[in-house]
Amino acid sequence: MKIIRMNIVDVGGIQSLSLNFNDRMNLLCGPNGIGKTTILESIAHLFYNGQTLILKRNVASETSKIIAEVDLEGVNESIEINLNTFIPEEPSIISGLIKRTSGLFSLKTQRTFQYQSLQAVTRDSDKNNQILWNDAIFGINLSEIKNWFVNRYLYSAHKEALSIQQLNNFELAKKCFSLLNKDFSFSKVSASSNEILINTPNGEIYYEYLSSGFKSIISILFGIIKEIEYRFKEPNINAEDFKGIILIDEIELHLHPEWQGKILEILLEVFPKAQFFASTHSPHVIQTAEPQQIIALGLDNNTVIQRELPSSEFGFQGWTIEEILSDVMGMNNLRTDVFKEQLSEFDKAIEEENPEKAEKIFNKLDILLHPKNNLRKLLKFQIAGIR
């Protein structure tokens, strides 16, 4: 299942926006409040059934709609949902592609976790239609991942207790600990306490003691694998064969820039047949994206648009972070106000041909600049020129 294209009309702050989607990765970027989350919520609501307070019509419109074309295993189907209220407490009633909701996973911004004592290992959760519809717009339950992992560990020791697909998925989950850092690996589950222990360069630790960035990615990977197993039981499927849709809000949350640059590769490797939609504020994430995977949003006369981006064989992998911030993410100011003020005063001193004043301002700029910034040489040449 893939979403081919979508048209959003008068939803939230979006007046009219038509988007064509990549069948593997779609990264939404742009300023805060531009509509990235609205797009993710619009996709989720295409598979929802019931009342919603999350999406509202545009304040200047009487009605709003979301129209999409979805590829359902080779058969294209159109879906339209409508929103008719702007008042916070008044819900809209939606009926989307409700028979396909099991193929949509939504991960919200709360993805780290604290220590959780597991007194007993319970059976897999039943995912009835109401739970699936709620998961679509409120996000999948990440508190279940520890129970799921320990359950699979315990039953994997018993012949034929798990299906081949469940065993494969458990092996995949164990490998996830090493995907970010090869020096980390799964160790064991303690028989006396049901605790998951991880090998690290400093010895064994509880998996809750991993860094927030590590836990954020583990939440994403385990959350998806767990949902695949809970939703697809007859028959079970391998996680790597999942062909559904995965929504991730603020994909770079809690991640160091080095790991921000790895997250796309990891997701596409673990789930090679899924279609991803993710919002991001990270130039490091965008830098590693393939061509046609970036959806850059901007404003034109106060109307949300998709900004046209340069197209190249290698995407933005050869661009600097500053070039991505300015040309892809639309950030106009890459220097602080303090620096820009001092540079403006320096320019005035040069125009006035006042070398003493320019020299005094240069001394401040010298402290502000990066130790290896070549701008110093240019500034010195300008001072020498007016002397």
Image: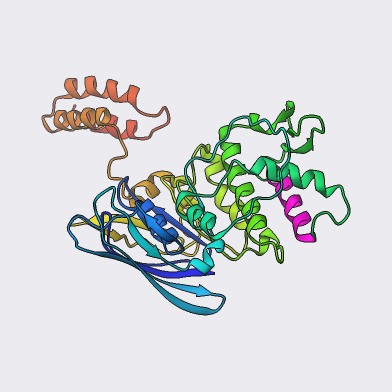
Question: Which residue is situated farthest in the left direction here?
Answer: 352
Q: Is residue 19 left or right of residue 61?
A: right
Question: Which residue is situated farthest in the bottom direction here?
Answer: 75
Task: Decide whether residue 173 is among the magenta residues.
Answer: yes
Rendered-image quadrant of the C terminus: top left
Examine the rendering and report whether any part of residue 322 can be seen: yes
Quarter occupied by residue 321 = top left
Which one is nearer the viewer's eye here, 368 or 92?
Answer: 92
Which one is nearer the viewer's eye here, 341 or 63?
Answer: 63
Q: Residue 180, position in %: x, y?
A: 64, 42
Q: Residue 329, position in %: x, y?
A: 35, 50
Question: Which residue is situated farthest in the right direction here?
Answer: 159
Magenta stretch: dominant secondary structure? helix
Q: Is residue 319 left or right of residue 91?
A: right
Which one is nearer the viewer's eye here, 73 or 321?
Answer: 73
Residue for point 52% across, 80% down: 75
Rendered-image quadrant of the N terminus: bottom right
**Start-end of magenta stretch:** 164-176
Residue for point 82% across, 49% down: 156
Quarter occupied by residue 230 = bottom right
Q: Residue 191, position in %: x, y?
A: 82, 33
Examine the rendering and report whether any part of residue 317 can be seen: no
Q: Is residue 313 left or right of residue 62?
A: right
Quarter occupied by residue 236 = bottom right
